Amino acid sequence: MKTQIYNLLGGIGLLIFSLYMLSHSSQNYFSSWFHNKFKHKNVSKLYSLFEGIIFSFITESSTISATSYSSILEAGSIDFVNILYFISGVNIGASLIPVIILLNISVVPYLLIFAGTFIVIFVNKNTKKNIFNLGQILLSIGLLFVSLIYIKSGTIESQLIHLIKNNYISSFFIGIIIALIFKSSNAVIILLIPFVQNNIIGFNSALFIIIGANIGSAFYVLFKSYKQERHIIITSFIHLIINITGAFIVYIIYIINPLYLYTTSYVALNIIILHILTNLLGSFISILISNQIIKGLLNNIYPLKTDNSTKRFKYLNPIVTNTPSVAIEQCIKEISRMGEIALLNLEKSFNLIFDFRRNSINQIQKDEDLLDYLEDALMNFLTTLSMKNPTYGESEVIMSLYNMINDMERVGDHAVNLLDLAEYKFNHYVNFSEEASVELKYFFELCHTSFSKALEALKNRDLEKVDEVVELEQKIDSVEKQLRKDHIDRLNKCICNPNSGMIFLDCLTNLERVGDHAYKIALTARDIVKTLQ
């Protein structure tokens, strides 16, 4: 009896560990490819369905896939209807995973463990991360099969088993609880099969455990989305609705005639088919009424609330820190957003120098506060990301992003400096000569163009824009020197007074530094593009 208990506990522990390693290593191995597939809009519904099946199967978990499809929706790549199709595919793909335990490959698991261990030990995970992740995948698959051997030899009858045998409600809640603990319905199915094969748990009890496991895995995703963005919560509700729908239909079939669910005399295969059937039916019905489900969620269950606070990420989802490649892509989008806000503030502040409107000040200050918030939040995010064992190349990109965030924020500071100069100029009735105004506007256009091109280089990975910024930087430096010289000449000729001259020179200084930051951003963007290629 003791040996059986030890085998069972050891097998369960090994099962949990192997599934955890398999899901995370698979996610790391395939996530970049998956994210690139969804980077473009106008993804078809059928494409979303098949991508869900494929991605869930290769990551070995519908709950792991949930974090990924939330990040895709965060970036605005696909809408909620596509997400419903994708989650339907995720459920179908995840239910196919337990099929591998039916394969009669007695020697292969040990070969997989040997090959996987060899790769994990001798391959540098920083320089050859994909090969390292592949080794972890092979190792975890081998350990998964070995865990089943221990579980099967350790199956025992207990008071808990007797409770499940005689009470289907208990079976249902046991399925939910185990799925919440294991974070996966597949783990429950894999664990359940040896007990059914040894006639310790009957088919009827197994049915209710499967129903509970399906609902429990969806509840895990819902719990994980607590206090997340609205779209993530809605996505989690979609997952829950699909799983509940499938469970309800299977339960109705069971009430009508349980024999309809007996598809084969081979009990292990029957359990797996039942799991697949539950997900297929839930997905099929949900797809048929997808528009009604989405409309109900958006309008009635979780309507859009007006949020006066803009201090939040627009593209970045903190739950993707376990996948540095995806996190970096989203972080670049958020930094580009910082640049766009800083550029808009720069335009507003400069226009106030020549046409001062006091009602514009408040919005500029709000945008500057948002830039300060994004700077702190992105710095904290990158610090967390750097501790998630990124590759050497990803670490280099993270360091580059630190510097770029600082450059973006500094451009915002120079915009505020121009605002202060505009306010001083207005309050003290200072005027520029026509010649000085023309020169300052020309210089602003140069610096504005340089910063705009630097942002394009970052957003579009356009190395030609980097070269254009480098050329503009040289021109900005030479033009600034000439403008300072012309200003001295105007002072000597008494065309300008010292008070207006001070403001003119301060404007030149701030704009020239914007050009410097644009130059740094462009060079950093070039380094990032080359590293990520």
Image (spheres, rainbow, N blue to C red):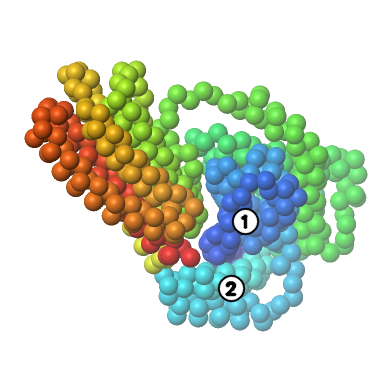
Residue nearer the viewer, 197 or 97? 97
Badge 2 is on which residue? 138
Nearer the observer: mark 2 or 1; the answer is: 1
State the residue at coordinates (87%, 60%).
Answer: 264
State the residue at coordinates (51%, 23%).
Answer: 306
Residue count near mark 1 (Cα–Cα under 10 Å), binned few <14, some 14–19, many ≥20: few
Q: State the image quarter where residue 308 is shown.
A: top left
Q: Position of residue 465 (x, y in %)?
A: 43, 55
Q: How many marks?
A: 2
State the residue at coordinates (68%, 67%).
Answer: 152
Cα distance between the residues tagged 2 and 1 = 25 Å
Q: Position of residue 162 (x, y in %)?
A: 71, 50
Specify the farthest residue to the front. Answer: 493
Q: Mark 1 or mark 2, which is nearer the start of the sequence? A: 1
Kindly state the secondary structure of the residue where label 2 is placed. Answer: helix
**Left or right, residue 290 beside residue 499:** right
Whether residue 143 can be seen here: no
* Amino acid type shown at disc 1: Lys
| Residue 37 - label | 1
**Left or right, residue 456 beside residue 524:** right
Give the quarter of the figure containing the N terminus: bottom right
Q: Position of residue 421 (x, y in %)?
A: 21, 28
Tell me: residue 242, above or below residue 194. above
Whether residue 449 can be seen here: yes
* Amino acid type shown at disc 2: Leu
- Report if the CB atoms under discs 2 and 1 are less than 8 Å apart: no
**Left or right, residue 255 beside residue 512:** right
Tell me: residue 175, above or below residue 295. below
State the residue at coordinates (50%, 37%).
Answer: 228
Residue count near mark 2 (Cα–Cα under 10 Å), binned few <14, some 14–19, many ≥20: many
